[in-house]
Image (cartoon, grey):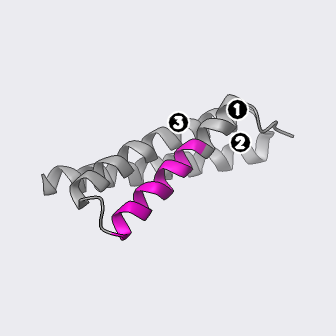
Amino acid sequence: MVAVTEPAVVLTIAWLLVLFVVAWRYRFGSLPSARAFVLVAAALAWLAFSLLQLADLLSPPYDDALGAVSGITLLVGAWFALRWWRTR
């Protein structure tokens, strides 16, 4: 069992909160699309890093699955960075 006060857990929750706030502000029009793309790309990259830290705390079948989710998250973040690069 992983404690909620572990830095990896706190960072993961914080980056999920950042993604929620960015989506909320973009949805209701107070955040331009170019800035939303770059914020989502950065938040997803840091979320992937946090998920890798969290995977180190888990047992063998779960750490591999979380590592794969982390890789996919990083690829999605790179896709958002590419979209940001094209809209600038």
Single out the mark in the foreground, 2 or 3: 3
Q: Check disc 3 and report its element: helix, strand or loop.
A: helix
Residue range in magenta is: 14-28
Disc marking residue 56? 1
Badge 1 crowding class, 10 Å Cα cut-off, few under 14, some 14 to 19, many 20 or more, is some
Are the residues flagged by discs 2 and 1 in contact, CB closer than 8 Å? yes
Whichever of labels 2 and 3 marks the residue nearer the N terminus, that label is 3
x, y percent for residue 25:
38, 61
Which residue is labeled 3 in the image? 49
- For the point 70% across and 32% down, the residue is 56
- Rendered-image quadrant of the N terminus: top right
The extreme bottom residue here reads: 28
- Rendered image: mark on residue 63: 2
Decide: is 16 above or below 6.
below
Query: Disc 2 residue type?
Result: Asp
Q: Residue at x 54, y 50 (%)?
A: 17
Q: Is residue 75 magenta?
A: no
Callout 1, which amino acid? Asp
